[in-house]
Image (cartoon, helix red, strand yellow):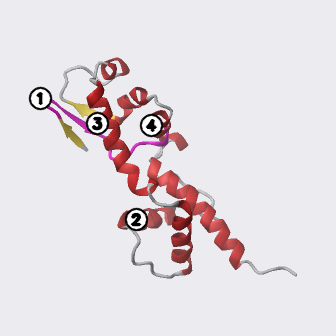
Amino acid sequence: MLLEFDDSWILLKDTPSVHEMNLIKEGRAIEALPSLILEWSIDDPITFKTCMRLKAGIVSRIINVVLESVNYILKQDELELKLILKSLMRGINVPEVDKKILELYNTTLYLVDHRGNVANFPNSGGYLDQPFDMMYFLRIFRQAFSEWQNENQPKGR
């Protein structure tokens, strides 16, 4: 995403990682800025010290844009999302589902194995390096998948 200011611009990541969202949640947003910012028009390199020199209004605008990028998944109720996922697993078409959530669902099917365990991460690196929205969705998907499996398992009585 490109943010333009009076005489400068800042290019941000499309989605924050789990680590960056944890830092923002803890109130340490300045520490997340060097990894959120891809490029800027300032001649200095992107470091923690140079990010500390940004005005508070610019930092708050950056954080608001970052939070808006994951708001579509955070505003969704977890229970409602679980019910939607269970319906999709049963093969029922749910027409009022957000397009981004359907894309996450289709991507998630490639990341989990037949038991619902995470077989692959979407990006290289560890858990904290993965996109926040994907990992949030994956956590809810795993819960819904295990509930769906328990409902469909034959009772051994």
Determine which quarter of the picture holds residue 61.
Answer: top left
- N-terminal-most mark, 3 or 2: 3
Query: What label does residue 20 carry, if any?
Result: 4
Viewer-side residue, 67 vs 111:
67
Residue under the point 27% across and 29% down: 57
Q: Position of residue 107 (x, y in %)?
A: 45, 63
Q: Marks 3 and 4, Cα distance to the nearest angstrom? A: 16 Å
- N-terminal-most mark, 2 or 1: 1
Please name the amino acid that badge 4 sits on: Glu
Q: Marks 4 and 2, Cα distance to the nearest angstrom? A: 23 Å
Pointer 2 local density, CA inside 10 Å: few below 14, some 14–19, many at least 20:
few
Query: What label does residue 61 carry, if any?
Result: 3
Please name the amino acid that badge 2 sits on: Glu
Q: Do the CB atoms of the residues marked 3 and 2 lie less than 8 Å apart?
A: no
Quick check: 76 above or below 15? below
User: Which residue position is annotated with label 2?
Assistant: 103
Magenta stretch encompasses residue 21? no
Quick check: 83 above or below 39? below
Please name the amino acid that badge 1 sits on: Asp
Q: Do the CB atoms of the residues marked 3 and 4 lie less than 8 Å apart?
A: no
Q: Magenta residues?
A: 5-20
Viewer-side residue, 44 vs 8:
8
